[in-house]
Amino acid sequence: MPKSKLVKRKERKPTEFRFGIGEWYGTPLVSLTSGERRRFADLQFLPKSERPEIACPFQVDAACKKAGGVCSLRLYRRQAETGEVRPVTGERGQPRTLCPSRFEEGQEVYHWVAETVLGCRGPLILNEIGFLESPPTADAAAAPSDVGRIDKVLVVPNSHPLSWCALEAQAVYFQGRAMGNDFAAIREHAGDSVPFPKAVRRPDYRSSGPKRLMPQLQIKVPSLRRWGKKMAVVVDHSFFAALGRMRTASHISNCDVAWFVVRYEESGGQFRLVPDAVKFTTLEDSVEGLTAGVPVSLETFEKRILAKLKRLSGPRQVASD
């Protein structure tokens, strides 16, 4: 009787997920034609002095200043069986804001913040007001210089006494290979389909939150609190979801920091920012949420020390008690 042959099954490639360009110069990547995508990619390889200005669709009469012109990241999926590339939908598919100017769409965020904090729908919007000055020096003739500024100040028009609040808008940095890898891939991509992101990257909420935003709050909020003023912080839904749980206050009068959380809605091939939630917190509770870490046990930590020592020492034995 002939021996049965063992049929070796071909292993399927796993479905891949990667973050790539969400919006490029204000338009979702998937809504751009292949020609428009290649034109934007070509711009990135020109000397800076030769790159034409492209208007930012979210700011008033301003050109895009974001290197590469990428407004947001988006998660893409490459189907294992077919190789088809599509953006992920649902909560995981929410764009991650890379450029703080993205929050300025129609100035609706400013109206929302001013109405909530100041009871005014149409605030005056001031940029970069000096907040910290350099300490006095031995040179009496030297004037103090600004060493820290509040990014935005919203003011109630014609208010006496002056009624205002401070505002910080925090986008996310990303960790991984630079966008230049994707720009090059888009230039070379044939056909009208969306190319799968060339490099592995992810939103870096640890750098954006505890390392960047938290020091800003710790420096500015104590003085604002003494003055009886509020700090508004604008972040997107995915950023806020990445933070630790914060205790919240029931009323704005009991808060130091008001978190204004926005989300993206897709319609007609475009994304639109919409209000999602407002959270009132103290500075201390905001810092706790930004830290978002639980210490491991001593035993676990020391095991990690020994594992790293073993890797560093190679074949040599690491002794432990």
Image (cartoon, helix red, strand yellow):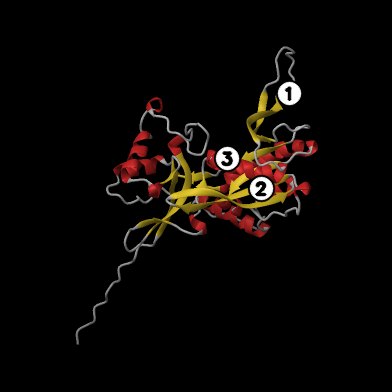
Depth-wise, is mark 2 or mark 3 nearer the camera?
Answer: 3
- Work out whether mark 2 precedes mark 3 in sequence or the reverse, and give the earlier one: 3
The residue that appears at 52% across and 36% down in the rendered structure is 59
SS for callout 3: helix
| Residue 180 place in picture, x, y as percent | 40, 39
Alpha carbon of mark 2 to alpha carbon of mark 3: how far? 17 Å
- Work out whether mark 1 precedes mark 2 in sequence or the reverse, and give the earlier one: 1
SS for callout 2: strand
Depth-wise, is mark 1 or mark 2 nearer the camera?
Answer: 2
Alpha carbon of mark 1 to alpha carbon of mark 3: how far? 36 Å
- Name the amino acid type tagged 3: Gln
SS for callout 1: loop
Mark 3, other Cα within 10 Å: few <14 / some 14–19 / many ≥20: some
User: Circle 2 sits on which residue?
Assistant: 259
User: Circle 3 sits on which residue?
Assistant: 107
- Name the amino acid type tagged 2: Trp
Q: Are dots 1 and 2 in contact, CB under 8 Å?
A: no
* Residue 202 visible in the shown view: no
Alpha carbon of mark 1 to alpha carbon of mark 2: how far? 32 Å
- Name the amino acid type tagged 1: Pro
Q: Where does the C terminus fall, quadrant-wise?
A: bottom right
Q: Where does the N terminus fall, quadrant-wise?
A: bottom left
Q: Is residue 20 above or below residue 168?
A: below
The residue that appears at 38% across and 62% down in the rendered structure is 14
The residue that appears at 22% across and 82% down in the rendered structure is 3
Of the numbered discs in the image, which one, if any, rests on residue 135?
1
Quick one: 84 or 113, which is closer to the camera? 113
Occupied quadrant, residue 151:
top right
Depth-wise, is mark 1 or mark 3 nearer the camera?
Answer: 3
Quick one: 124 or 211, which is closer to the camera? 124
| Residue 205 place in picture, x, y as percent | 57, 48
| Residue 140 place in picture, x, y as percent | 75, 13
